[in-house]
Image: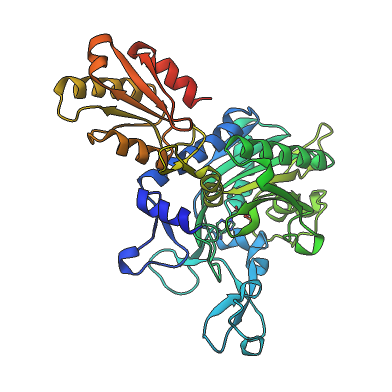
Amino acid sequence: MDELVALCKRRGFIFQSSEIYGGLQGMYDFGPLGVELKNNLKASWWESMIYENDNIEGLDSAILTNPLVLKYSGHEDTFSDPMVDCKSCNLRFRVDQVPDSCKKEDLTEPRQFNLMFKTNVGPLEDGESFAYLRPETAQQIFTNFKNVIDSTSKSLPFGIAQIGKAFRNEITPRNFIFRVREFEQMELEYFVMPGMDDKSHDSWVQKRLDWWVAQGVPMDSIELYDVPKNELAHYSKKTIDIMYKFPHGLEELEGIANRTDFDLGSHSKKQEELNIKSNVAANKDSNSKLAVQDEEGNWVVPFVIEPSAGVERGFLAILNEAYNVENLDDGNSRVVLKLKPHLAPVKVAVIPLKKNNEDIVNLANEVKVKIQSLGLGRIIFENTGNIGKSYRKHDEIGTPMCITVDFESLENKTVTIRDRDSMAQSRIDISEIPSFVESKIKS
Ligand code: GAP
């Protein structure tokens, strides 16, 4: 973990937030390379969910949430962790995260601590005009259920997917970006007919595993955890967690829950007219029935399968898998990030061999512009004049290819392409670069 943290800071992936004022615990900022990798990861998820499935639609809902949403979702009552104070060090911990240095006799009895952040809305600070910062992106998917159906004419089974910030006032944020107070979730709520939920759940577990493997997280670093009944969230009938071997231990990367008809049922008016299977609190405030009608005209509240992944945890797992230190034949070593090309923050670095040779520099610039126009992501023109140093840097940030423009390029319009993983170099025609680069990045 220390090596990853150091690399992230050194190369501009991740910085401590508000660092110049001593930081803010549980908050991180993504730097120039971090934002690229994060965007690429989110784009890959979006593509696999929405573009590859005609029955899944996207959503981008507000973060500040009407408290009634989180009252009826059950979060006001249940979204809490048990916390203890240590009378010796005067610090507060989640019960399962008390450090060994605190003696048992110094700890207070556990108390429940609600993890939701509140903020004032409007100019009055009367304690009444407040909103919650959403603790999961899911709830506004449920509250928009009817809007999406009415505007897209979807019928079951169908899904609504969203990527966005979520906030939790974690008692003990820790392990770099693994447990933070502000993070992003990639969540799908997939609505199915009751009775079809178990099969759909199994199939989503498999689809999500396949997706993580395609992002460079191999199956031998993953374990599935069938969450025992006494650990299930209040809405869940069954949850399978995808556990990843993080540098600090085996922990949850993504949860895939069967949320039954709890959420749509909870947020509905006239619940007695609906055949709700789960145990929901009476709703006096909703103005909508979040249900569909079957062929006989009966109201049915769909069951929901929810794959919910954390962007930061995905980022950390991907970085951890990609990070390699290799010993070279010349006795030196190199750090190389073997990221999948579609995730790499920089796709190609174009390097003129001679920094001050106008013809070489101009041709290298032309090559850069040509590759950039392919729309594959960030292409960098790297005019340091030190080719060895440029290769080392691009190995370390995971750039799949470096293209060098040299004197021969001026004569015969060819360039050298160096492959990040094998370090092999080959010469190709400038005219062949677009197809070569495209096939490599999309592979
Ligand atoms: N809507 C379901 C839900 O929110 P969750 O298991 O509480 O379920 C889903 O969270 C995912 O969000 C987790 O698998 C994890 O990847 C990520 N996550 C949750 N809390 C987090 C935190 N404090 N810091 C970073 N990621 C977090």
User: In this rendering, is residue 283 above or below 386?
Assistant: below
Count of marks placed on residues: 0
- What residue is shown at x 79% (from left), y 64% (from top)? 230
Q: Where does residue 16 sit, x and y in percent of width and height?
A: 39, 60
Q: Is residue 204 visible?
A: yes
Snapshot quadrant of residue 385: top left
**Viewer-closest of 379 and 335:** 335
Snapshot quadrant of residue 52: top right
Q: Is residue 375 visible?
A: no
- Quadrant for ligand 1 reads bottom right
Q: Would you say 432 lies left or right of 166 here? A: left
**Viewer-closest of 380 and 204:** 380
**Viewer-closest of 148 and 52:** 52
User: In this rendering, is residue 69 above or below 293?
Assistant: below
Q: Where does residue 339 sit, x and y in percent of width and height?
A: 50, 38
Snapshot quadrant of residue 196: top right
User: In this rendering, is residue 42 above or below 436?
Assistant: below
Q: Where does residue 402 sit, x and y in percent of width and height?
A: 36, 29
**Viewer-closest of 75 and 265:** 75
Q: Would you say 87 lies left or right of 204 here? A: left
Outermost residue toward the top in this view: 412
Q: Where does residue 168 sit, x and y in percent of width and height?
A: 54, 63
- What residue is shown at x 63% (from left), y 33% (from top)? 56
